[in-house]
């Protein structure tokens, strides 16, 4: 069992990141006994499964087959809301620290968007951009999707924030398939590679072609798309890009009541199995 909150001090504080990392470290010898590792993230909060997968991949990628299982239901996801959200965002363990903040280094933020509330997105933005002198925002939305208008609906929901307040250019919008995390992975990697090359002349004093700017990913979306963002972060970090992942802690989830069968847990569910091995990345439903 991974403890998520610590009540021992004057104020309650989140401890899921270090506890998840310790869980993997303490079980490395036991995991070495098996040829295949299967991680079911269907009921796990993002701040746990991001750290869990990062530690497992760093320890076993190329040595064992690692499978990720995720149960997706677009309608249920749309009606599921986190409760007890933290007031301030944070960087996940292994993907960000205070020392990474540099006001002279451009920040490129790639929020992977779903039907989250506007306040969650704003808290992430304010935390990431609080000391950024130069910034670029490239929102990624789901297209194609089960709902053909889902991308348009998400863009319209955040229209004021994205275009009126933050000044996002429409050409910066990225599209990734709702049910294909590997396409999301590729689109993010292409975007990072592009900005890394374009912004390099602004940072002549920085050594290394991959250190031209700081990239921050935020996944406030479905698990499949979030996994695509994580895989991009993991791979790009190995290629020496400056990668951060920012998110919010929460204390649980609440599912709105729904009368239609498709919106009920167990109705219209699809289970996806993603294989991560040294032969490459594969996935299937």
Image (cartoon, rainbow, N blue to C red):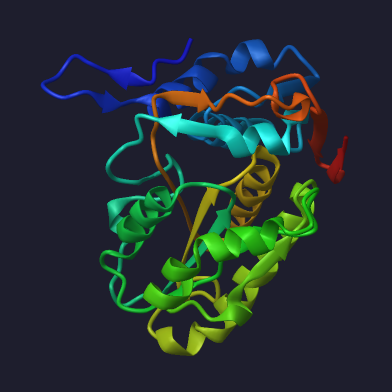
Question: At 77% across and 24% down in the image, what residue appears?
Answer: 261
In the image, is residue 100 above or below residue 106?
Answer: above
Q: Nearer the viewer, residue 158 or 272?
A: 158
Pick the front one: 150 or 261? 261
- Which residue is located at x 42 percent, y 39 percent? 93
Task: Identify the residue at horizontal 55%, vertical 70% (top origin).
Answer: 138
- How many marks overall? 0
Is residue 90 at least partly visible in the picture? yes
Quadrant of res 3:
top left
Residue 201, given in percent of the width and then of the height, sits at 48, 90
Q: Quadrant of residue 16?
A: top left
Quick one: which residue is furthest to the left in this view? 10
Residue furthest to the front: 259
Q: Is residue 66 above or below residue 140?
A: above
Identify the image quadrant of the C terminus.
top right
- The reply to whether residue 64 is in sight is no
Left or right placement of residue 107 versus residue 67 in this view: left
Drawn side of residue 281 relative to residue 47, left or right: right
Where does the image place residue 165, in percent across and percent down from the top left? Answer: 37, 74
Image quadrant where residue 73 sits = top right
**Residue 25 drawn at (x, y percent):** 51, 21
Instruction: Tell me residue 187's x, y (percent).
Output: 71, 64
User: In the displayed structure, would residue 139 be above or below residue 163?
Assistant: above
Q: Name the foreground residue: 11 vs 122.
A: 122
């Amino acid at each position: 069992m991974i403890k998520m909150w610590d009540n021992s001090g004057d104020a309650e504080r989140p401890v899921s990141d270090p506890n998840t990392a310790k869980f993997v470290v303490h079980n490395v010898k036991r995991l070495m006994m098996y040829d295949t590792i299967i991680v079911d993230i269907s009921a796990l909060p993002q701040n746990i499964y991001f750290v869990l997968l990062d530690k497992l991949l760093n320890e076993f990628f190329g040595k064992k087959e690692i499978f990720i299982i995720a149960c997706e239901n677009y309608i249920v996801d749309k009606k599921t809301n986190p409760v007890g959200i933290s007031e301030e965002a944070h960087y996940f363990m292994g993907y960000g620290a205070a020392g990474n903040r540099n006001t002279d280094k451009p920040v490129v933020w790639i929020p992977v968007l779903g039907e989250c509330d506007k306040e969650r997105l704003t808290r992430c933005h304010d935390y990431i951009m609080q000391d950024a002198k130069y910034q670029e925002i490239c929102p990624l939305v789901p297209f194609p999707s089960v709902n053909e208008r889902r991308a348009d609906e998400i863009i319209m929901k955040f229209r004021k924030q994205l275009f009126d307040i933050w000044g996002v250019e429409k050409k910066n919008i990225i599209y990734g398939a709702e049910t294909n995390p590997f396409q999301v992975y590729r689109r993010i990697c292409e975007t990072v590679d592009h900005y890394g090359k374009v912004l390099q002349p602004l940072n002549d004093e920085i050594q290394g072609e991959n250190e031209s700017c700081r990239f921050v990913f935020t996944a406030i979306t479905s698990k499949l798309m979030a996994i695509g963002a994580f895989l991009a972060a993991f791979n790009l970090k190995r290629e020496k890009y400056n990668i951060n992942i920012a998110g919010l802690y929460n204390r649980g989830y609440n599912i709105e009541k729904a009368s239609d069968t498709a919106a009920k847990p167990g109705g219209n569910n699809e289970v996806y199995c993603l294989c991560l091995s040294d032969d490459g990345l594969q996935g299937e439903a």
